[in-house]
Image (cartoon, helix red, strand yellow):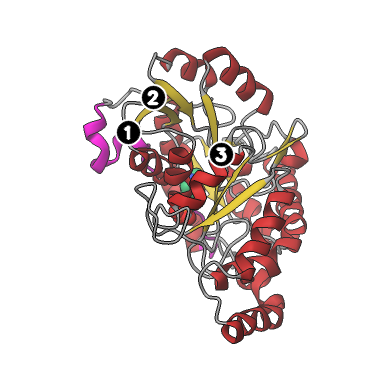
Amino acid sequence: MVPFVDLTLTNAPLQGEIKTAIAEIVDRGDFIMGQAVTSFETAFAKACNVPYALGVACGTDAIALGLRACGVGPGDEVILPANTFIATLIGIERSGAKPILVDCDRHTALIDLDAAAAAVTARTKAIVPVHLYGQMVSPSALREFSATHNVLVFEDAAQALMAEREGYRAGSVGVAAAFSFYPSKNLGAFGDGGLVVTQDEAVAQKLRSLRNYGAPKKYVHADKGTNSRLDSIQAAILNVKLPHLQGWNRDRNQAAQLYDRLLDSIPGIDPIRNDSGEGHVYHLYVVRVEGDRDALQQKLGDRGISTGIHYPIPCHLQPGYRDLGYPEGAFPQSETLCETILSLPMYPGITEAQVRATCEAIAS
Ligand SMILES: *Cc1c(COP(=O)(O)O)cnc(C)c1O
C-alpha cells in the first residue's frame, strides 16, 4: 500500500512539542495576533530572505490582500497561468483586478513568459507566476519581464515553500509573494493559514491594516479592510515545524530523484522537467502519461497505490469561470496537460521501497 500523502509521519514525532506550544497560548490567552504570530512572521521572513512577513487566514487571502496592498485593484489587469489551482484566480478576482490567463510551457508546466509578454496591455499592473508543483519560475526571467514591461511580480509560492533557483528563495523575487499553510502543503498547519512576504515597507504597512479591519490604529478605519489573520495556535504549530522544513524538502527532492531514475526506462511516462535541480521542493511529483491515463490511475488504485491529478480542468474551462470568455482550445498546452498528467505518491518519509513499488506497478 502506498498512500498519496501521509501527514502522520511528519506530525506525530512533533506532537509533544506542539501540545506544549498550544498550552502556552491557552495560558497566555493571546489567541489573536499573539506572540506566536509575531515570532513565526520573523522566522519565516528570515527563511525567505525578505524583510517583512505577515500572516493572514489562508493562501487565497494572501493573494487577494497581498495584491491590494501592492496597489492592484479595479481597472487593472493581472496575468496568471491557466494551469494553476483555482485559488490563484480567486485571489486575483477578489483584489478587484481582471485576471488575464496565458498558457504554460509544455516541458515544465510553468507559465510561458512569451505568452505573458504577448498578453501585456496598457492596463497590465502585475503578473502572478505560480511556482507550480514546488519549482520556481526562473527569477532572472521574471525580473527581466518586470523591467521590460513595467509590471509588478507577485509570486504565488503556495506550493514552493523554501524552493530555490538561481540563488533566489521563493518569495524573494517579486515585490511580494503569497504562501499557504493548508495542511498538505510542504509546511502545513492544523487548519487554514496563509502569509504574505514583501520587500516593501509600504506594502507591509498596508497589509497590516487590510488584514485587521482596515485599521492602522484601533477603531480608526483608514482602509476598507477585512478580518484575515493567522491564528496564534496555527502560528505556534508552524513555529515548531518550520525548523524541519528544509529536511522535509530534501526528503521530497531525494524521492523525486529516485522516481526520475526508475521511470527513465519506462516508455510512455514522462516526468515534468526539473530545471532547478536541488532547489525544486516537489510539493507534487507529476508525470505525463502517454495513452490511457485514467486506466493507469485506476489500475494503480486497484494495487493500493494512490495517485492524484493536479489539476483535471484548467481555470478557463471551469464551469464557474466560463464568463471569463475563453473558448476550449485557448490554451492548448494547459489543456493537454490536464488530460495527461498524474501525480505520484510524494511526502517526506516515503520509503525507497514505496517509490520502487510504485514504479514497478506503473511498468507492469
Ligand atoms: C494551496 C494553493 C493556494 C491557496 O491556498 P489556501 O490556503 O488553500 O487558500 C493558492 N495557490 C496555489 C497554487 C495553491 O496550491
Up-down: is 304 above or below 63? below
Tell me where residue 168 appears, x and y as whole percent: 73, 35
Callout 3 crowding tier (Cα within 10 Å): few <14, some 14–19, many ≥20? few
Q: How far apart are marks 2 and 3 (CA)?
A: 36 Å
**Mark carried by residue 331:** 2
Up-down: is 305 above or below 88? below
- Left or right placement of residue 95 versus residue 47 in this view: left
Amino acid identity at mark 1: His
Of marks 1 and 3, the one in the foreground: 3
Marks 2 & 1, CB-CB < 8 Å contact = yes
Specify whether residue 198 is in view. Answer: yes
Residue at coordinates 70% horizontally, 83% vertically from top-left?
16
> What is the magenta range?
303-325
What secondary structure is marked by label 3? helix
Find disc 3 in the rendering and name its residue: 202
Of marks 2 and 3, the one in the foreground: 3
Marks 1 & 3, CB-CB < 8 Å contact = no
What secondary structure is marked by label 2? loop
Find disc 1 in the rendering and name its residue: 316
Q: Was residue 323 drawn as part of the magenta stretch in this picture?
A: yes
In which quadrant of the rendered image does the N terminus lie? bottom right
